[in-house]
Image (cartoon, rainbow, N blue to C red):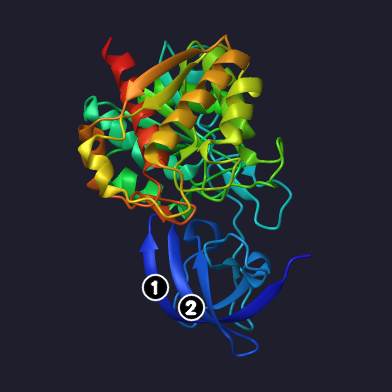
Amino acid sequence: MITWRVGNVVSLGKSWAGAQELDVVDQAGNRVRALAYPMLVGEVAVGSAVALNSSALDRGLGTGGYALVAAVLPKPGSAPARRTDGPGHLVKARYTPTQAMVLGVDEQDSQFHAVLEDADSIDGMPVITADLHSALPAILSGVRLGGDALKVAYVMTDGGALPAWFSRTAAQLRELGWLESIISVGQSYGGDLEAVTVHTGLLAARHVVGADIAIVIQGPGNLGTGTRWGYSGVAVGEAMNAAAVLGGVPVGSLRISSGDLRERHLGISHHSLTALGRVALAPGHIVVPTFDPSDSFFGDFPLTSDSPSWQDIAALVARQGGELAAVAPHHTFVDVAVGAPLHEALSESPVRLSTMGRGYGQDPLAFLAAGVAGQYAASLVAR
């Protein structure tokens, strides 16, 4: 059951594209950190009365520490505004109290309908798939080593946050020009373009955005139960299949960690082993990072006393990669060496790198693995 709070906005905090932080004092006098999406609920200001969904916050779950503004309440005695016009007939987050109506990139009212009506191929475009949203800036760092003029579209799936506006990372990458467009697909919404499926999102990336590369990743907030199949990253395999059926080149970015000491995630995560080994039935390219622990820049990454050595981690990744290749022989496994240029690019990333609370210094392989996938995809465009 949803936990509701009602209160008044007492201050505004940071804002980015589509999102506004604010502080609310609720009916019990508690000060609550909240997040509003003005394009969904309307503009908020100091003094606004708001209704908050605080269910996840109250239980300490993953909403970034926010209560979420579900409505800006009308002033006493005034009638709420009714909206009967506006573009779009696609309903996202359907049949929830905050369902959103948006203009689909390929629906009849869209200026791009004719372009996409019979579109059936993405013309060999590389499509990078990854499990965690935190891989996005690292993948782009790798892509840009292959040429900063490449156009990249981010296709955001609905396994994590539904509003694209929640991602400060995506907003910063868009502002920097590293992303040409954000396309929200499935039940997610709030991108530059809206699409019904990953397939139509990829078609829009190619034929509307003119992207050279597409990246398919869920929004922030990976969901998992600690079981083989109970995690939202299973969709990585389905994205590989979608890219292949549309005539693209699926490129799998492995989820690898040197900082997560849980057995199922150390080295190549079981998420990647399942999604790429068993769900991705169409042939794709799986990028396996190779590295020499004696390289000087690995001295920047001291390991904790309970961590395996870099030599042991390198051997583990090599062994796991071999096991994945054995169960998924239909894929092409590509070894890409981690080098100093990628390390420098990640070290100087203008967007904060963080995965599960660990930065680049605490979990370098998580970002290096994503970066080499971006490098490899860029090399495919150059061929």
What's the residue at 35%, 36% (across, down)?
368
The kind of secondary structure element at disc 1 is strand
Residue 13: give its label.
1
Residue at far right of view: 1
Q: Is residue 300 above or below residue 209?
A: below
Front-lying residue, 145 or 259: 259
Front-lying residue, 304 or 320: 304
Front-lying residue, 65 or 292: 292
Q: Tally the numbered discs.
A: 2
Question: Tag 1: residue type?
Answer: Gly
Q: Is residue 95 above or below residue 55?
A: above
Please tell me how crowded label 2 is: few (under 14), some (14-19), or many (20+) other residues with Cα within 10 Å. many
Please tell me how crowded label 1 is: few (under 14), some (14-19), or many (20+) other residues with Cα within 10 Å. few
Q: Classify residue 135 as left or right of residue 53.
A: left
Question: Nearer the N terminus, badge 2 or badge 1?
Answer: 1
Q: Residue at label 2?
A: 23
Image coordinates of residue 319 in percent, x first then y, are 51, 24
Tell me if label 2 and label 1 are in contact, CB under 8 Å. yes
Image coordinates of residue 351 in percent, x first then y, are 31, 50
The kind of secondary structure element at disc 2 is strand
What's the residue at 30%, 28% (across, down)?
151
Observer able to see residue 274: yes
Tell me how far mark 2 sits from mark 1, CA to CA. 7 Å
Image coordinates of residue 148 in percent, x first then y, are 22, 30
Front-lying residue, 162 or 226: 226
Observer able to see residue 113: no
| Image quarter of the N terminus | bottom right
Q: Classify residue 1 as left or right of residue 323.
A: right
Question: Tag 2: residue type?
Answer: Asp
